[in-house]
Amino acid sequence: MHTLTANDAKRNFGELLLNAQREPVIISKNSKNTVVVMSMKDFEELEAMKLDYLKHCFESAKKDLDSGATVDGDAFISSL
């Protein structure tokens, strides 16, 4: 993944957009990675994966509730 400073990204915004179409680009400010610029296609795929994972988590939790495979919250906190 390519990294640009915020100033370089500002000066070369058109190039940033072109590069982000090929792969995500990290933008750093004050020597810290701050944001990632990515193509709309990559963003939509990431959002779809997150949604699929959330659906899986909810389905798994529903199965646990239906089968009675639950843990008492107080007991769980105490075990930590």
Image: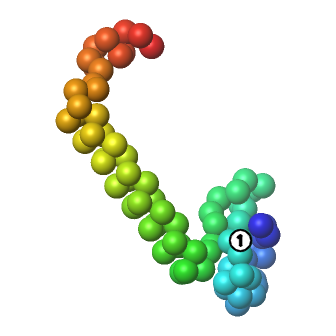
In front here: 3 or 78? Answer: 78
Residue at (43, 54) in percent of width and height: 53
The x and y percentages for residue 79 are: 41, 10
Is residue 22 visible to the viewer in this orientation of the structure?
A: yes
Mark 1 burial class by Cα count in 10 Å: few <14, some 14-19, many 20+: many
**14 relative position to 79: left or right:** right
Locate residue 41 relative to residue 15 in the image: left or right. left
Instruction: Identify the residue at horizontal 67%, vertical 84% (top origin).
Output: 21
> In the rendered image of this protein, does residue 77 appear above or below residue 61?
above
Quadrant in the rendering for residue 52: bottom left
Q: Position of residue 34 (x, y in %)?
A: 65, 59
Which residue is found at the position 25% from the left and 42% from the top? 62
Residue under label 1: 25
- Residue 45 percent across, percent down from the top left: 52, 72
Q: Is residue 40 above or below residue 78?
A: below
Element carrying mark 1: strand
